[in-house]
Image (spheres, rainbow, N blue to C red):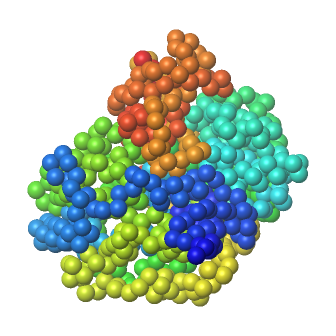
Amino acid sequence: MKKLTKKFTHSCSLDCYDLCKFDVYRKGKRVTKIMGSTDNAFTKGIICSKGRKHVDRLYSKDRIKTPLLKVGDDWKEITFEEAVKLVGEKLTALKAAHGSQSVIHYAESGAGGVLKGIEDIFFNFYGGITTTTGSTCWGAGSQAQKYDFGDRRSSDIDDIFNGKTIILWGRNPYNTSIHLYERVLQAKKKGIRVVIVDPRVNESARAADLHISPNPSTDGALAMAVTKLLIEERGVDTSYTEAHIHGYEEYREYLEGLSMDYLLEETGVSKEEVETLTHIIVQGGVSCFLGYGMQKYTNGGNSIRAIDALMAISKNIGREGAGVFYSNRVYPSLLNTDPYGSKTYSVNSRTFQVTEFVDYINRMTEAAEDPIKAIFISKCNPLNQYPNLNESIAAFEKIEFKVCIDGFMTDTAKYCDLIIPSTNTLESEDIIYSSMHSPYLLYNERIVEPEDELMDEYFFFQKLALEMGMEEYPQVDKRTYIGRILEPVGLTIEDLKSKSINLSRGEVAWEDMAFPTPSGKIEIYSESAKEEGQSPIPIYIPSLKRSEEFPLRLISPHFKNSLFSQHYRERDGLSRLYVGRENIRSYTEGERVSLSSKYGRIECTIHLDETLGEDMVYMYAGWNHKHGNPNFLTYNGSSEMGGQVTYYDTFVKIG
């Protein structure tokens, strides 16, 4: 009998700006292909190679499908029932002896979906545990925009066609946001100017009409130079600033105290370039997209705040074809993501900042009171992505009981005591949204069955709750649970199946110029920042500088064909270091070299990037340990706000 091909609705679970909607095709019981949905106004039938790789990962020969228990130096297969019993006994004993806060759950967004985060609900019912604050991704910029606007919003992506200029400030959509890049190319054909601000000539630069290359970590100084010139030579609409901006005068006075020569020297940008950028911005109609790399410095939050201030003073907020876009937080405040009230049971919760992982674990594993005894890892690979990996791994190994929920033997999983296999996104029913750019709330059908139902975290933690006698834990089917999540917005699963749902507040961010800040205005002067020990206005803080011993700043941008470490697993060879002409003189292209910092040393191959200067090098993020991971070299410092890891304040030497 001929097998029929069926089409299913799904969407990409990767932690990406775009949240692509998929049409997934299954023949018999096997997924055959993934295509971009043509009925979604954001996706428009286009997806990247990472999205298509969900099928490769689903059927990979390296997938873990049975729980693995470490016995000595070997792995022993156990059943899911045995894994549930083992985890249940361990958690019960730890809670009785040390309290539920002796357990850490560390999760990121490596696998999207509301129910992919069901562990948070479980650990609330468990009594509350230890979790992290801060970020390895976007923390400083998120906090900055909270101070400035009260929230993070982005306009509809197609609003760029209503403007005059697109600025990609530290943003490289060619690698990280295929739908924004496609629209940038379309906009350019329509005569809309494209400006790129980035220390390196990134892959999106081919679309640029103007490329400005400030020194790394000086984006804030550049924004201040432009704002200073705008105020002093172009003039400002004071009726506008009085109506919509809190703190304009205080910021103007601060800029008066900064000399233009100083700002130009810091940025390495010419006065002519500043004048050109100022001329472009004062014309209005500027859509400015901010990348996350520029806030991975000690001064990262203030850099974002300075750009926000520039866009506000130039009247590029709340208008058609204009805005400053960092992320797009729509659904966390609209959905009921805790429909069974788990937080009321979370009485022992505590936190520590992720940048302090090493010190915190070293201290708390030895503590006489309230020690750390266990860690659960889900949706992430911290021993690949944490900075200062040598010390991070050493600290991690001190934890008594380590559990990783994953489908592959990642760099983190191999250091754990128990690995619990998880489903591929195509094996899980869920709803999903992004807080980065895409404004859609989407439904993911389960397309194929997992080999064991308990590979789905939703059912594993239900079973674990039963094992541990958690009477309050919701033992309901997925559709009932999802239905409760959707109740506040009056939607059902059938609504999400039949159409793309966009609940964002209009096509233009902040069009009503009403901001959820204490003043109700854009806050260049933020009392909230002041109360939290920050400067109330954006200030320029020079970041760390290179030394004679380590003269090269290392940055680690995102690779086009992998989301962090997820798609590097199958790659062979060593990681690749890109350097300018001056730094390759003693080497041949592709030569194996040693790269070191004060935190560690790796082996990699060296490659020429003609556009780089002599004091900066880069490696893409995501390389595994076996390749030579740059995070063995990176600095585990913190940004001045938001607890962002300052990866880009890392300095290295070759040889």
Image quarter for residue 467? bottom left
Q: Does any portion of residue 326 appear in the rendered image?
A: yes
Depth check, front residue: 189 or 217: 189
Q: Position of residue 653 (x, y in %)?
A: 44, 22
Q: Is residue 168 left or right of residue 319?
A: left
Residue 328's spot in the image, x, y percent?
61, 64
Query: Most extreme residue toward the right, as rendered?
Result: 191
Residue 42 placement: quadrant? bottom right
Question: Which residue occupies 81% across, 39% down?
Answer: 209
Residue at point 57% right, 52% down? 50
Please tell me which residue lies in front, 614 or 275. 614
Quadrant of the image containing the C terminus: top left
Q: Is residue 44 left or right of residue 8?
A: right
Between residue 290 and residue 277, name the one nearer to us. 290
> In which quadrant of the rendered image does the N terminus lie?
bottom right
**8 in relation to 370, above or below:** below
Relative image position of residue 408 (x, y in whole percent)? 38, 54
Residue depicted at 67% across the width and 46% down the height: 174
